[in-house]
Amino acid sequence: IEQVGDTLDLDITQDGQDNVIGTSTTDVHLDGDTMTFAITQTGSRNTIAADIQGNTYTGTWAFTGDSNAVDLSCDSTTGTNCENITLNITTTGDSNTFDFNVGDVSDADGSTISFTVTGDGNVIESDVDGKSADITVSVNNSASTASGGATSGLLTSSGAGNVIDLNVDGDGDSAGHKINLDVTGGGSSYTITQSGIYDNTVDADFSGDNQDVDITQSD
């Protein structure tokens, strides 16, 4: 799928397994302002690779199933794209991977991103560059029902808990950056890195054994 033009409203629904929306070499490319792009996938071993260029993007992505892979890039090579992003992702299942990159050289003006994950062995890797990033992650995993974990980049889950890596860069304005992390279930690993001028906040609540948490904030 390759789209150029403003005010796109794209809804994709897939039910089954081994579905592909874009690949690592030929991804879905969407170029235009004021864009709405929603995906609903039910099944296992589905793949999504998408690249978005535009000033305002709203996305609602819902996944049910195991071993799915999602790679989303909302980048800016011209300094005018991906200014305001609203993204809501929900997943129920095991061993899923999510790679999300928003902004480029601290371009995005405002990002509101929400992850809701229920299942074991999932990996979320998110890199957000820009001002006023507001990220909420809610994770609920059982003791361990997955036979093997997921691998995303350099991140690997053991299959029991989940692995979350959040990296936020860019100068925070008066609102600054904020990360809310709510974790239920043990055996998970979380890394949070925030950098910028002032107003970096982490609000975290953990319930479960064997949590591994690293938080780094700097101006």
Image (cartoon, grey):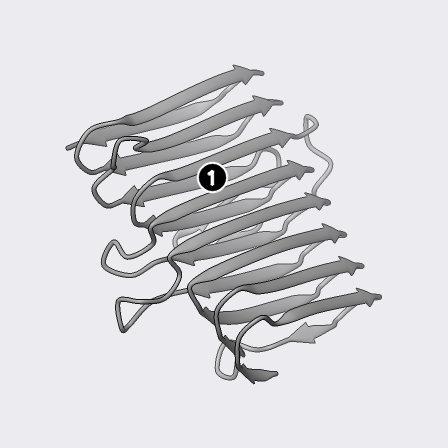
| Image quadrant where one finds the C terminus | top left
Is residue 27 rendered to the left or right of residue 45? left
Seen from the viewer's position, the closer of residues 96 and 169 is 169
User: Horizontal and vertical percent for residue 166?
Assistant: 39, 41
| Image quadrant where one finds the N terminus | bottom right
Position of residue 66 relative to residue 203, above or below, is below
**Which residue is tagged 1?**
164
Position of residue 161 relative to residue 91, above or below, is above
* Quarter of image, res 200: top left
At label 1, the amino acid type is Ile
Q: Can residue 147 be seen in this view?
A: no
User: Horizontal and vertical percent for residue 22?
Assistant: 59, 77
Label 1: which secondary element: strand
Q: Which residue is drawn at 30% across and 49% down?
A: 130
User: Horizontal and vertical percent for residue 52?
Assistant: 48, 69
Q: Is residue 17 visible?
A: yes
